[in-house]
Image (cartoon, helix red, strand yellow):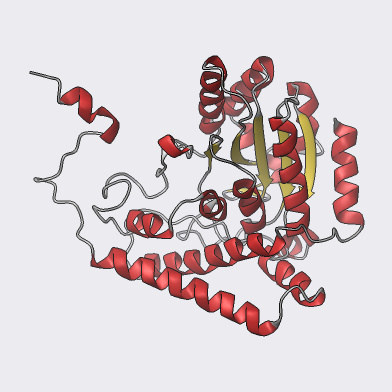
Amino acid sequence: MLQAAQRSEKKTKGKKTAPHERYLEAYRWMLQTRVFEDKLASLYRGGLITGGVYVGRGQEAISAACGMFLQKGDIFAPLIRDQAGRSAFGEPLIDVARTYLGSRQGPMRGRDGNIHRGKPGQGQLAMISHLGAMISVTVGVLLAKKFKGETGFVGLTTIGEGGMQSGATHEGMNIAAVEQVPLVLVATNNHYAYSTPNDREFACTDLVDRAKGYGFEGYTVDGTDLAACLDVIGGAVKRARAGRPPQLVVASVLRLAGHGEHDDASYITDEIKREPFAQDCLKCAEKVIVDLNLADAETLKKWRDEAAAEVENAVATAQKEAAPEAGEEDWCAISMRHLVDQIP
């Protein structure tokens, strides 16, 4: 398995991977996410968002690939930097804007933090924590589907390299392999767990080395290379769906922002910023598109303008909507309403 990971790494780093057939679709999810999250950061700095804002700047290629290969009946458990994957999986942008801006018409009805949204009935799990909790939750849902006799499904969740050091991650990966559920775990090594660098997080050469010990198949990928992300993550989903062991994909990037918008990322060294993995995946994708004449400059501008218009429309709509009224709201959890109504 480690040999497979090393082969994947050599393939993606030794030469430029040819564009995947869905390259332009993925690029547009990345672009929409970048424009939207830049808008969220601006709203946060203007005091218009309550709570934190955590963006996936630099991780959009990985995230988009995570959402694009999932089908109806699959399970997706995204984390705080996975807006591109959420959108590719079908999350409407208006729902996201409503959640960040506290609209009572949003999927969370203006309650809780903005990062815990989800639609379990449609296969998107609501995040509990970004520190490994979603691995065991995803495994549990996959086991339930197996017990019901369902077939042909997969579950995918993500984790940062900091979360890979948590006990919950160990437990979740272990039971996934023991029960042989069709799990894909995409671990993004963005080189800082908040402000803690890799050498203070783990001592193995590469996190993919852990795959064999858990009974996973492991692969590495350059997270700045969209084509490679589509090939490697898409391949992992295909293998899991075909009944192979659980899949671990470790992607290498640099988080191109602080841990959240409250963090200036002053701890990131200039040396790290010069590393190949510190490139901006969106700019790298645009260069490939231009170099290979996949789209011209006019088309790229049109796509950016369309993304900006969609973002502005979603935000403007959410801003006009009322926040919840504490004394008038039905604060019962939506999933529990029918039980409450049965109480005499």
Q: Residue at x 70, y 27 (%)?
A: 246
Q: Nearer the viewer, residue 195 or 155?
A: 155
Q: Is 305 on the left-hand or right-hand side of 107?
A: right
Q: Residue at x 52, y 69 (%)?
A: 35
Q: Quadrant of residue 339?
A: top left
Q: Residue at x 73, y 65 (%)?
A: 279
Quadrant assignment for the N terminus:
top right
Expressed as whole percent of the image width and height from the top left, the position of residue 121 reads 41, 35
Q: Residue at x 56, y 49 (%)?
A: 194
Residue 35 in view of the camera: yes
Q: Is residue 336 depicted above or below 263 in this figure?
A: above
Q: Quadrant of residue 237?
A: top right
Expressed as whole percent of the image width and height from the top left, the position of residue 196 reads 62, 46
Quadrant assignment for the C terminus:
top left
Q: Is residue 276 depicted above or below 110 in this figure?
A: below
Expressed as whole percent of the image width and height from the top left, the position of residue 203 reads 76, 35
Q: Is 272 on the left-hand or right-hand side of 118?
A: right
Q: Nearer the viewer, residue 46 or 311?
A: 311
Residue 222 in view of the camera: no
Expressed as whole percent of the image width and height from the top left, the position of residue 223 reads 72, 54
Q: Is 51 on the left-hand or right-hand side of 91?
A: left
Q: Is residue 172 depicted above or below 43 in this figure?
A: above
Taking the view exactly as shown, the residue that stands out farthest to the bottom is: 298
Q: Nearer the viewer, residue 329 or 343?
A: 343
Number of on-image labels: 0
